Amino acid sequence: MAGAMLAVCTAFAQAHQEAAAPASGPNPLADKVRAANSRFVDVKAATAEGYAPIPCASGITGGAMGIHYVNGQYLKDDKIDIARPEAVMYEPMADGTLKLVAVEYITSKGPASLDGQLFNFNSAPNRYGLGEFYELHVWAWKGNPTGTFADMNPKVSCEHAMAPSQ
């Protein structure tokens, strides 16, 4: 009985520690991304730097990426710069605000990597209407149970995204 109680308490303590862990967990690249891009916590910083929104992206099996604010100039230059992500991603909240959750690096030159983390390849045609490209999502502000670099995050929702006419 005491052993079972100890196991339950240990599991509870571990779950509590995981819930209190930083958004990205112990991930040096996510930490660097967060340090280089925390200015985007306020969406006004993104728009001031030339980022423009595209509709909220949800996954067909659940989860979402959120609303991408994309910088067209960075998209064209094919450079990978930790402080100049091609897209900044926000989750729309019930009160109408946008919460920074991740950034995305995109290049057509590859194979590509950032600090040793390989980008994912997207062939053409694709849902974005782009040619072939390489991309890397970094969930530096909202933990992602499917991985720091996964495309979709099951903890993100487009539920509160405004319709385009609003």
Image (cartoon, rainbow, N blue to C red):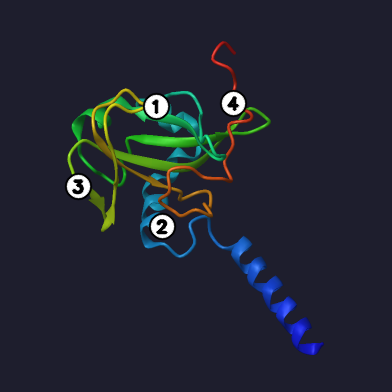
Of tags 4 and 2, which is closer to the observer? 4
Q: CA distance from mark 3 to mark 1?
A: 31 Å
Location of residue 14 by image quarter: bottom right
Percent of width and height locating residue 57? 49, 30
Is tag 3's residue or tag 1's residue first in the polypeptide sequence? 1
Location of residue 30 by image quarter: bottom left
- Residue 160 marker: none
Is tag 2's residue or tag 3's residue first in the polypeptide sequence? 2
Horizontal side of 43 relative to 135 (left or right) equals right
Is tag 4's residue or tag 2's residue first in the polypeptide sequence? 2
Percent of width and height locating residue 34? 42, 51
Amino acid type, mark 4 = Ala
Amino acid type, mark 3 = Pro
Of tags 3 and 4, which is closer to the observer? 3
Q: Is the Cβ of the residue at disc 4 closer than 8 Å to that at disc 2?
A: no
Q: Which residue is mark 4?
A: 161
Amino acid type, mark 2 = Asp
Q: Which residue is mark 1?
A: 48
Q: CA distance from mark 2 to mark 3?
A: 23 Å
Residue toward you, 50 or 7? 7
Mark 3 residue element: loop
Percent of width and height locating residue 26? 45, 65
Crowding around mark 3 (Cα neighbors within 10 Å: few <14, some 14 to 19, many 20+) is few
Amino acid type, mark 1 = Ala
Q: Which residue is mark 2?
A: 31
Is tag 3's residue or tag 4's residue first in the polypeptide sequence? 3
